[in-house]
Image (spheres, rainbow, N blue to C red):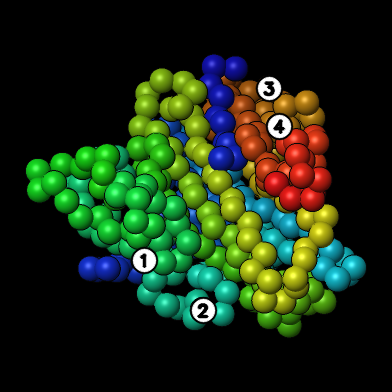
Amino acid sequence: MKNTVIFLLLLATQIFAQTKYRLNINYIDLPFDNKGIVADVIIDGSIGGKFENLGFLYDGGFLLAGYANDTLWANGVTSAFLLNDYLPGTINNDPSDSKNIIYVVKASDDAFGQSWQNWINAVELGADFYDGNNDNIYDPVDLNGNNMWDRNEDRPALIGDVMTWCVYNDEVPANQRTFNTVSPKGIEIQQTILAYASNLSPLSNTVFIRYRLINTGTLASKLDSVIFSIFTDSDLGDYDDDLIGCDTLLNSSFYYNDGDDSQYGDDPPSYFIKFLQGPISYIPNVSYIDNNGNNIF
């Protein structure tokens, strides 16, 4: 197969009501919104994830399951199957608050410009930043007055050529969910989606998604044995000839066509999903040496 689509795991002065965004800087065109839905989002009359202007992803999201006080629970975001258990913003915050948007920073943005200033609100919601002057406060100011960024000055924690960030939470009431026996658990998810403006494989065919899961402790002091899974409903051109497989050693799954495809022709791409990193586990004398024997890293 000639092409391989890789889908990876890995603004205050003025606020724009940007509740959805299309990441389109390489061969992948991927729309998403500010509550966890990936691909199944309409922007300018177009919907779905596309590779070289042809569809490969109908819907994407995630699934979570675990225990809270010894009670099994599950939730997620898979719009194709009517699972929409998350709202924009942080816990106990109005979902319609103007700060609950998708924040976008580009490598080409002016230093200390609008996107850097808008990032102040993202930081208030939990986003990372580069603390150049080491004062633990995000303040994107040209301290040196030279109209360029220097290492002792603050800036967004930019990765890639375009990076987006938003936060959402699981406060959708149980009676408004498809599976209405599961109540909110006080979970926040900080989502970062980024890509590189490259014409060279593999970066030209890659989008990175990072989910940061937070138990706020507002409803459950401990969420135990939590399992996180990526969800995708892929339509690789014509969905009737799609096949799927997995590689357990590489923590990966893949989609491919059963021969020719009516949209992609006789050389259709494959579509690959890979977990790059899971949560960091602090296991005494396994992941670290517990020198004082208190089982705390």
Q: How many marks?
A: 4
- Residue most extreme to the top: 2
Q: What type is the residue that disc 4 sits on?
A: Ser
Closest to the observer, 182 or 1:
182
Between discs 3 and 1, the one toward the N terminus:
1
* Percent position of residue 78, x then y: 66, 58
Closest to the observer, 153 or 122:
153
Between discs 2 and 3, the one toward the N terminus:
2
The reply to whether callout 1 and callout 2 are in contact (CB within 8 Å) is: no
Q: Residues within 10 Å of mark 1 (few under 14, many from 20)?
A: many
* Residue at x-position 55% and y-position 65%: 168
Closest to the observer, 186 or 173:
186
Left or right: 41 with respect to 61?
left
Left or right: 228 with respect to 194?
right
For mark 4, what is the residue? 252
For mark 3, what is the residue? 259
Q: What type is the residue that disc 2 sits on?
A: Asn
Q: Nearer the viewer, mark 4 or mark 1?
A: 1
* Residue at x-position 51% and y-position 62%: 167
* Percent position of residue 121, x then y: 36, 66
Distance, label 3 to label 1, CA atoms, is: 49 Å
Q: What type is the residue that disc 3 sits on?
A: Gly
Q: Nearer the viewer, mark 4 or mark 2?
A: 2
Q: What type is the residue that disc 1 sits on?
A: Asn
Distance, label 4 to label 2, CA atoms, is: 35 Å
